[in-house]
Structure formats: structure tokens, C-alpha cells
Amino acid sequence: MKPAIDYATALARLQPHTAPVLRADGLNHQELLARFHPDYAAAAKGVLRVGVNRGQPCHPALAALLESNALIDHADLAGAEPLCTDVLVIGGGGAGVAAALSATDAGAQVLMATKLRIGDSNTVMAEGGIQAAVGGDDNLQRHYEDTLRGGHNCADRALVAQMVSDGPGIIRWLIELGMDFDLADDRALLRKRAGATSAARVLSHGDFTGLEMMRTLREAAELQPGLEILNRCPVVELLSGDDGSCAGAVLYDLEAKRLLQVRAKAVILATGGSGRLHIQGFATSNHYGATADGLVLAYRLGARLRDLDSFQYHPTGIAHPRHLAGGLISETARSVGALLLNGMGERFIDELAPRDVVTAAILRECAEGRGIERDGQLGVFLDTPRLIAAQPDCLVTQLASLAHLAKKCGIDPSLEPLLIYPTLHYQNGGVVIDGDGASSVAGLYCVGELSGGIHGRNRLMGNALLDILAFGRRAGKQAASIELSGQNLALGAHRRAGIDHVHHWQRVMAEAGLDMGRRAPLLYPEYGHFQLRRKSAA
């Protein structure tokens, strides 16, 4: 990597009264990705050695967790408090809450367990908006084609078609629940353009749409009959039946420091992604609990996974100051006109190209000596002064989160550009699912960022919030309909459930010569120094 340009020099090279011209580039998008995107680096190459995806590519950091031993054994279950429910939802973000609401609406008794608290998830950090083809100049086919093209035509076409078809109905549902969307002057829903799309179809609430969505969903969940919520009870293992199906889960009550054994007709995992693994040393925009727990547990039980070597690095994460590195600046800023400039004052990429392309372009500028260095932090400029000069009210009307973040950085964005660098943002791959969120393991549903196949190898802005609601609602309805040979779990007529699959997994690990002392799920980032402790062991 060549030396960067110092901040003061780069700042002096900005020409606020001259419109930057997009620099001609000799690399096409695919060449740019191959040379500079993190997914293509040698450090990203690995292969799984055990499990149903044995022999398939997987990022080494993720493979280390997928090939780990369990946190508990049979002896740990002896004193676990037994609970039962129709549907167990694990995860309190948008996907989990949507699933829980749908399952209870279908008549099921639902227990929802969260690692932190309901709403503490990546959903609240989704700023830009939600895509849905509701405009007169737009249609479902265009949304479908944009999504496939943006994901390099690697997505499951049936899942994409279903997601985009659900879009308009989901917007109506959210409005009925009380969600507030931005309106245009004619009082119609305000639609914005996302990168790599052919129409303006992103609906938003300022630049904190996910927060408003989660507020709406949380309030609905807290008033929902038939729904019990257990906060601060992360999942440590799934329960399996004699037939290999998912029969519930083991939770850890952080407050009481005890295990809970929950049997259920169906389990819906909505545990989110893996951003807090800080893959390849990148800072992350993800919330504290995003440690790939659901992937680990689903895989150990036998669920098939896909695209485990594909991650999204959002182009515009904060680079300076260091303690805020990775904090997200929404794509909305680029959508409304903010430009990316290197240390030479050059505009080097179409800001609304696909996210992976913009990321690779930024990394190229930094690698080739056109990046900007400030106090040891590297990046390029997001030219907010030029944007605000052209649209003086944009910080109030469209970019409130950016204004708040700039204040935390000690920057007046109308006078000084923000230094940005790609941040680890999204897990493109995950559990293979069908149209109802069902995995390849009977009784186990996986929704939200945990699932794979919906976005291909690159996700478009606004499709994540649509994804979590489309498949969350479908999984909840389907899980509520499961019958177990007429057994009534509420009356205590349970099928056998345990962790025999763990012992099988341990044999597989031993035969492959894997480290039996490495345990997962991680539950919290390694720098959290969390250790499972129970009162009985004190």
C-alpha cells in the first residue's frame, strides 16, 4: 500500500466552487472487485472440513466458529428449568418480532427470547429505508431485476420474486401498525433512489428508518396477546428430536445465571449476522450481539448453508475519530447528492454504483496512494459541505442521523467533509431456506440476516428491511401451523428432546482432528470477555 495524502493537504485541494468531474477509469466493475474487494483477498479463502457443507468455501473466521464444540453437554441440562410453547422465536430484531406477531395472529402461543433486549439489533441501525415497488413509474418486475443484478445474479430467484411481491403489502401493514413514512409535497409516499436501482423506490423515515420501524414493531409486540418476551436470554444450543428435527432450544438467563430448556413445535431463529467478528480486521456497523450464533447452531444441527464467503462492506463508515470507526453514514447521503473525493480532490466512482463496487473503489484509492490519512486513520472524503451548500435544509429534512454522527465526531459537516472508509456491514450468505423461511432441518426456520439466498453476493440498500419482514411474517404463520401427530405441547405431551446431535458433532470433530476446546456460539464479541457461568457451578 502506497503512503496516503495527509489530511491538511487533501483538505486544501478541495475546490468547493468547481463541480468535480468523474475520473475516467481503466477497470470495469468486475476487475475492480477482483483486485480490491475484501471477499477476493487471499485471507478470505477457506474451506469447511466437517458438516453438511463440507468441502465448500467459507471465510476462515466464520469456519472457525462453525467447526467448534458446543457450550454445554448433557450434564448441564439436569438442572435447567423446563418451559414449553408452540413457537419459540429467538431474536428480538425486526425479523424476530415480525415472526412472533405473525405466529400469534395465527393462534399460536409464542415465546420470544432475545440476547439483549427487544429491539437491540441491526434493525434499529438500518438508516436508509425500505424498498417496495409502490410508485406509478415502478413495478415488481423492475424491483426483481434490480435485486438479481445487484447480487451478481447469484440469488435464489424464487425467494427474490416472493420478497418483492410482498413489498407493497408490507408497507400497508407497517402503516396500519403506526409507522410514519416521509411524504412528498403531494402527500404521497416520498420515494428515494438507491444505488444500482432503476427507479426511486426506497421509502424512509428521515435517515433512521430502521429505528422508527423497530419502535412500531416493539410497541405492537409488547401489546400482543399470546406473546411472552424473555429479554437477556441468549440461545446456547438447539434441542433435537429422535428424528433429527428441531424440538426447541436451551437458553441462558443472564440475570439469574441459569439455563432454560424450552421445548417447542417449531423454532424460528432470527439471530442476525456476524459483523462483530470483525472479519479481516474491519470495523463494523453492526450491533454488539452480531456474532453468528444462529449460523453455528443451525449448522451443528444439520442445516445447509450457502455463500459463506460473501460479505458486504458498506462504503461509508466513519474513519475518524478512531473510537467511532465503523459508524454508519447512510447511503441516503449519496442518494441525495454527496460525492466521494480522494486526496487529490478527484471524484473517482459513481456514488450510486453497487455497494461492493463503491467499496472496492475506495479501497483502491487508499491502496494506490490517493487516500487520506488523519491521525493514523485512512479514508476518503464524503463531501458534505458541497451538498449542504446546495441543499441547506438536508440535515434537518433527510440526514438527521448524519448530523448527529458528525457532532459526535466534532465536525461541522457544512464546513468540513467527513473522512470515511468501508465498514463490515452485512452477511450475504446464511442458512438455505424455502419461501416460508424453513431450513433443511424439520421444525427449524431461519429469517433475517441469518438466512441466505435472498440477496446473492451483494445486497441493495433497502432490501434488508423488506427481507426481514417478508420472510419473518411468512415463517411465523407457517410455524404456527405445525402439528406434531396431534400432541398438545401446552398439556405436557412432549416428544423427546435433547442434545444428542451435539455428541454426534463431537465425534465428527474428533475424527477430523479439530480442536475440541474451541467452543461456540460466541454470544458476545471476544473483547466482551463473556464466560458462561451458572449459580450451580459457583
Image (cartoon, rainbow, N blue to C red):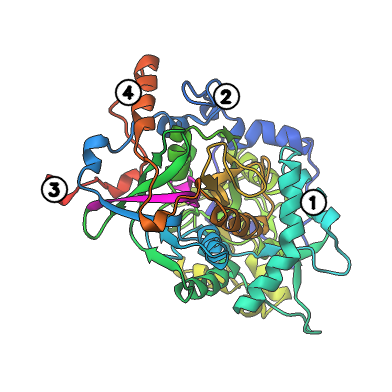
Residue bearing mark 4: 515
Q: Residue at x 58, y 74 (%)?
A: 400
Residue bearing mark 2: 56
Whether residue 497 appears in magenta in the rendering, the answer is no
Up-down relation of residue 86 to residue 394 (above or below):
above
For label 2, count other residues whose C-alpha is less than 10 Å away and answer few (under 14), some (14-19) or many (20+). some
Residue bearing mark 1: 144
| Badge 2 element | loop
Q: Residue at x 54, y 39 (%)?
A: 3
| Badge 4 element | loop
Residue 524 appears in view: no
| Gap in angstroms between the C-alphas marked 1 and 3 | 53 Å
For label 1, count other residues whose C-alpha is less than 10 Å away and answer few (under 14), some (14-19) or many (20+). many
130 relative to 499 in the view: left or right: right
Residue bearing mark 3: 536
At label 1, the amino acid type is: Tyr
Residue 82 appears in view: yes
For label 3, count other residues whose C-alpha is less than 10 Å away and answer few (under 14), some (14-19) or many (20+). few
Which span is picked out in magenta? 258-276
Disc 4 or 1, which lies upstream in sequence?
1
Quadrant that contains the N terminus:
top right
Q: Position of residue 138 (x, y in %)?
A: 86, 63
**Which of the two marks, 1 or 3, is nearer to us in this view?**
3
**Which of the two marks, 4 or 3, is nearer to us in this view?**
3
